[in-house]
Amino acid sequence: SQTCWSTPNCVARPKDSSQVSLLMKMICYLQTPFAVRSGGHSPNPGSSSIESGILIDLSQLDSMSISEDRKIFTVGPGARWGKVYEYLDAYDVTVIGGRIPHVGVGGLLLGGGISYWSGEFGLAADNAVDFEVVLADGTVVHANTQQNSDLFWALKGGGPNFGIVTKFELRTIPVKNIWYELNAYSIDQASELFDAFAAYQKQPDTKGTLALITSLTSITVGFIYSQPVERPEAFAAFYNITPVATLVPSTMGTVQILNMLSGGITNSPLPRHDYRGVSSKIDAGLYKDVYETWKEKATAVNAATGANMTFVLQHIPKNIVDIGNVNGGNAFGLESISQQWWTTLIDWEDPKDDEVVRGAAIATTEKWAELSAARDLKIPFIYMNDASRDQNPLATYPAANLEKLKAVAAEYDPHGVFQSLQNGGFLLFHVNK
Ligand SMILES: Cc1cc2nc3c(=O)[nH]c(=O)nc-3n(C[C@H](O)[C@H](O)[C@H](O)COP(=O)(O)OP(=O)(O)OC[C@H]3O[C@@H](n4cnc5c(N)ncnc54)[C@H](O)[C@@H]3O)c2cc1C
């Protein structure tokens, strides 16, 4: 996104962890401001970009390999998820990662990571078994259940606060042959669709994923199932609602074909992007009321600036939370209930409209939070990977987790290099709680 473009004094493109180590030693010695970038998909200014300082661009750390038994996949942070699925296709397995192919491996994993298969297998970070990390003093360590287990826990959702991750080992999942369908509906069907979405959220089958994206002109619903089962019961609540167009017909496909389709569907021609997240409990009435506010704001901002704002519902079944806990827990500390992580995405053209456009997104999410609080449906959690520059996701984690994250940061980075010299990102240093 052009919202975060900058021209760093220096760009370093390390080829391995020893070069990252050397860079960290230089940064500490010279006290140079720096930023770290994997895929560069965060639109937040200064998060993975810097003007006066060194940008550590990890794009060349993009190696991939798989263990002989196909159970563990090793990947560098600079790889893109699309390449990951392409590589794994030949081995008949996949991993929990980003839904859009060009998103980077590093940032998504450190912020949690929602995949099409998360309902069944958990968040991406909860499927990591080892992180190779370069600490502030240049030491290269491993974090897993046996070694540096406190750092292992902190890296699962704790963001860019502890070191530079130079390699991830991820558990593979046995998913290859799948079913999907993509339909477009009229906006006049919004109410029925939100009822159906809430019904889907309350049914027990976690093999299905629904992507429901509302724009001012249409509502697109993607139905995805991790098994080759046509029109599974999980989505039954939708089958009586007639779409205005079928964009992708009912298909028995593969993860790799879905990966290619996802890339084609999601490209926006507008150069500036932002996203914002909030969470709540499941409630169709809430979705309908927030949709009305969203529609009013999206219409006004579109008329004034041409900005395109969408309204996305993301189902987080209880199973996601429970798998995280079984795998040793993560920094989020979520309550073990099914929940709704909502995000609004906004794309626009002109930098002079930044404030007006972002104002519309802010007003919409504030209304969501206000309505959910008034109805006792609020969940304070803000998902880091969907959080905008002025949001403070770490401050929404349970207080005990936040204290533990601070203790881990102090242990592995005693001079606070990642807090004071790192240019941006969601840093513990900015959390007052
Ligand atoms: C089109 C699009 C689709 C998306 N789809 C999904 C999705 O399906 N699921 C989901 O969960 N999220 C999704 N996201 C959100 C995405 O997870 C975040 O934007 C994430 O930060 C992207 O990772 P990246 O490596 O590309 O980001 P970057 O911009 O490179 O990094 C983001 C942050 O992580 C830090 N960082 C990156 N790599 C490292 C590292 N190796 N070590 C230490 N710190 C590091 C950076 O310094 C920065 O603070 C999507 C975003 C976009 C724009």
Image (tube, grey):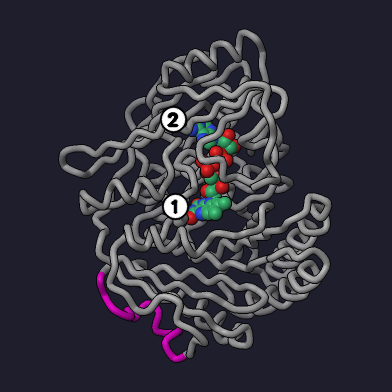
**Residue visible at 71% across and 35% down in the picture:** 430
Q: Residue 16: x, y in percent?
A: 40, 22
In this rendering, the answer to whether 356 lies above or below 182 is above
The magenta segment is 228-240
In this rendering, the answer to whether 81 lies above or below 121 is above
In this rendering, the answer to whether 184 lies above or below 383 is below
Q: Residue 204: x, y in percent?
A: 37, 73
Query: Residue 119 appears in which quarter of the rendering?
Result: bottom left
Mark number displayed over residue 60:
2
Sort mark 1 into few (<14), some (14-19) or many (20+) by Cα contacts within 10 Å: many
**Residue visible at 40% across and 50% down in the picture:** 82
Left-right relation of 319 to 314: left
Q: Which of 60 and 170 is in front in this view?
A: 60
Q: Do the residues labelled 2 and 1 touch (CB within 8 Å)?
A: no
**Earlier sequence position, callout 2 versus callout 1:** 2
Q: Which amino acid is tagged 1? A: Pro
Q: Which amino acid is tagged 2? A: Gln
**Residue visible at 60% across and 26% down in the picture:** 55
Q: Name the residue under label 1.
A: 101
Q: Residue 8: x, y in percent?
A: 67, 27
